[in-house]
Image (spheres, rainbow, N blue to C red):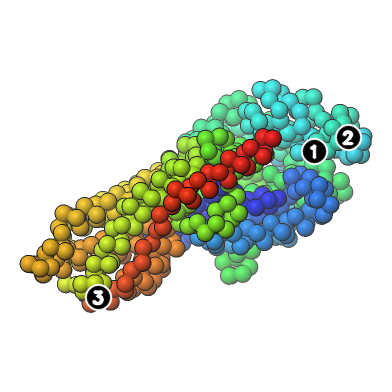
């Protein structure tokens, strides 16, 4: 399992979580069902955004990379996201693997050299790869950068395609100067892609977008850039491999890092029978469904079994944009304010379907926390544990009612369906639905009245509610890992990573029940106003 690599030229923002939280949840559920999962990610360390930022700050690209690589290493655990290995595309393993794969592609006739004329800034005295130039998209006419129409149609742009280019550093109109580059013969993989893509598992958005691009006609792909920073092309002093060559190879490089550390077999996954699953954002489908499988196929590696692409991210109803202020910096704006990481994980997957646009806004976030996490889930858990502690101090005698067991069984079945469909909202809704059932069950049985007249029956009701609490702890752990630790403690059975089957196992009579504390905190109107004002101020400053 892999996640699209975070680009280490800035801190973690809300759009990052659109990929990493669902992937982490998916991995946790697979492990609960007995699957052996190696969960891989890396810092994406090469390419022009890093060199542009380094020049602007008067530091080296390595300085930028080290700062933000360290940031992400520390950040992910704060959100409950734990990779089996988190590597770096600047690791020697990735440099060596990139060179090996491209050499294999050359040997198999899939890479060739070609002289071409590319934009060159006489003022800056350099070629203008990717983000070193801006201009007009030749396909839709929108403002675009050198390698992508980032403001319009989103298409990948080959070097030299941009219309009316200007140097993004000094604004000079570039000259066209001849240089030698290397190309992947992507056109040779058209038949392979036509056969491969319809059988690719994952989300329709990934499969269908890629097929549309194949139908529109493929072009050979320039895989080198005139830069100093990156994976050097052997024998070519002025060239490095394009970041979108070595970045996905970083999945392999990171797996090699894991194998060296643990004695694992990286080839089992990349050249053997192991399944390969990629979780990505919508902006990199082109790379993961066309370039990447073609590179792997042409170099003799396994190809991905599934690509799960999410929908786009919005902030306060607007398309996510750091430059326009429509951004939430997860540490600065959220964690540093003492807000709950589990609540954010829950919002990310429960607000909408995985392939639909996800809008992060403070008002609906507050409503979800207060109504669903506090009012439904937290309410049932706290009432159950508090009543059990006050009246029994331990798990009382009782037998799980068939109706209660059936509700848990239905919830597990829905969760399995959600995993098969990559629909994480379906999973979150099922868990909240089970808690809502628990509230109805508790309210309708009224054990606080039964304790005075039918004490054995009252104990049986609480036994069922505690059994539901344990089931919820098992089922919600992938979504709310921090809170589940507290539930297990209060149930008197501290543990982690309980298998899915544990949800249906009996309770141990007599297990002490600790005095509970509420798991979720209500967000006040004052806090909501402060958060909303912060978002408005950032947008206003960016637009001004």
Say which element carries label 1: helix
Which residue does the image show at 46% across and 42% down from the upper left?
363
Q: In the rendered image of this protein, does residue 380 appear above or below residue 17?
A: below
Q: CA distance from mark 2 to mark 3?
A: 77 Å
Which x, y percent locates residue 338?
52, 59
> Between residues 432 and 379, which one lies in front from this camera angle?
379
Q: How many marks?
A: 3
| 2 or 1: tag closer to the N-terminus | 2
Q: CA distance from mark 2 to mark 1?
A: 9 Å
Q: Is residue 311 in sight in this rendering? A: no
5 with respect to 129 (left or right): left
Residue farthest to the front?
A: 526
| Circle 1/circle 3 CB separation < 8 Å | no
> Between residues 223 and 447, which one lies in front from this camera angle?
447
| Circle 2/circle 1 CB separation < 8 Å | yes
| 1 or 3: tag closer to the N-terminus | 1
Q: In the rendered image of this protein, does residue 168 appear above or below residue 413?
A: above
Residue assigned mark 3: 393
156 with respect to 63 (left or right): left
In front: label 1 or label 3: 3
Which residue does the image show at 65% across and 59% down from the upper left?
71
> Between residues 260 and 312, which one lies in front from this camera angle?
312
| Circle 2/circle 3 CB separation < 8 Å | no
Residue farthest to the left?
A: 453
Residue assigned mark 2: 121
Residue assigned mark 1: 132
Say which element carries label 3: loop
| 2 or 3: tag closer to the N-terminus | 2
Say which element carries label 2: strand
174 with respect to 510 (left or right): right
């Amino acid at each position: 399992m892999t996640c699209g690599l975070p680009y280490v030229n800035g801190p973690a923002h809300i759009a990052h979580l659109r990929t990493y939280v669902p992937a982490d949840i998916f991995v946790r559920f697979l492990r609960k069902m007995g699957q052996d999962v190696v969960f891989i990610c890396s810092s994406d360390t090469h390419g022009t955004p890093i060199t542009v930022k380094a020049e602007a700050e008067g530091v080296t690209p390595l300085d930028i990379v080290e700062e933000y690589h360290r940031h992400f290493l520390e950040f992910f655990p704060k959100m409950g996201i734990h990779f089996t290995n988190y590597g770096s595309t600047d690791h020697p393993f990735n440099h060596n693997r990139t060179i090996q794969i491209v050499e294999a592609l050359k040997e198999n006739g899939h890479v060739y050299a070609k002289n071409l004329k590319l934009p060159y800034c006489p003022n800056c005295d350099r070629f203008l790869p990717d983000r070193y130039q801006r201009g007009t998209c030749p396909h839709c006419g929108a403002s675009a950068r050198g390698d992508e129409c980032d403001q319009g149609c989103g298409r990948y742009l080959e070097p030299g395609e941009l219309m009316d280019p200007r140097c993004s550093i000094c604004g000079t109109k570039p000259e066209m100067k001849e240089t030698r580059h290397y190309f992947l013969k992507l056109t040779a993989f058209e038949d392979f892609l036509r056969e491969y893509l319809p059988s690719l598992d994952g989300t329709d958005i990934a499969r269908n977008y890629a097929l549309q691009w194949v139908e529109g006609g493929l072009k050979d792909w320039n895989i080198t850039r005139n830069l100093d920073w990156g994976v050097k092309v052997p024998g070519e002093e002025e060239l490095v491999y394009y970041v979108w060559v070595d970045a996905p190879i970083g999945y392999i490089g990171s797996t090699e890092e894991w194998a060296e550390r643990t004695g694992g077999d990286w080839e089992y996954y990349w050249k053997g029978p192991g399944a390969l699953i990629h979780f990505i954002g919508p902006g990199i489908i082109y790379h993961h469904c066309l370039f990447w499988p073609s590179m792997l196929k042409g170099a003799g590696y396994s190809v991905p079994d599934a690509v799960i692409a999410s929908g786009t991210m919005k902030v306060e109803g607007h398309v996510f944009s750091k430059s326009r202020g429509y951004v939430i910096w997860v540490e600065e704006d959220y964690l540093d304010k003492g807000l709950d990481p589990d609540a954010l994980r829950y919002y990310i997957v429960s607000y909408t379907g995985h392939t639909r646009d996800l809008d992060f806004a403070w008002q609906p976030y507050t409503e979800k926390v207060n109504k669903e996490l506090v009012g439904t889930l937290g309410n049932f858990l706290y009432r159950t544990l508090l009543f059990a502690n006050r009246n029994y101090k331990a798990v009382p005698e009782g037998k799980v009612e068939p109706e209660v067991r059936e509700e848990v069984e239905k919830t597990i079945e829905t969760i399995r369906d959600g995993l098969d469909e990559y629909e994480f909202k379906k999973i979150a809704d099922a868990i909240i639905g089970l808690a809502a059932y628990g509230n109805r069950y508790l309210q309708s049985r009224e054990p606080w009245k039964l304790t005075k007249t039918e004490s054995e029956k009252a104990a049986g009701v609480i036994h069922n509610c505690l059994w539901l609490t344990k089931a919820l702890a098992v089922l919600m752990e992938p979504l709310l890992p921090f809170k589940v630790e507290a539930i297990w403690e209060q149930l008197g059975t501290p543990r982690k990573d309980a298998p899915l089957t544990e949800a249906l196992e009996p309770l141990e009579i007599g297990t002490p029940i600790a005095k509970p504390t509420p798991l979720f905190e209500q967000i006040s109107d004052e806090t909501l106003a402060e958060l909303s004002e912060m978002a408005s101020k950032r947008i206003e400053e960016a637009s001004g």
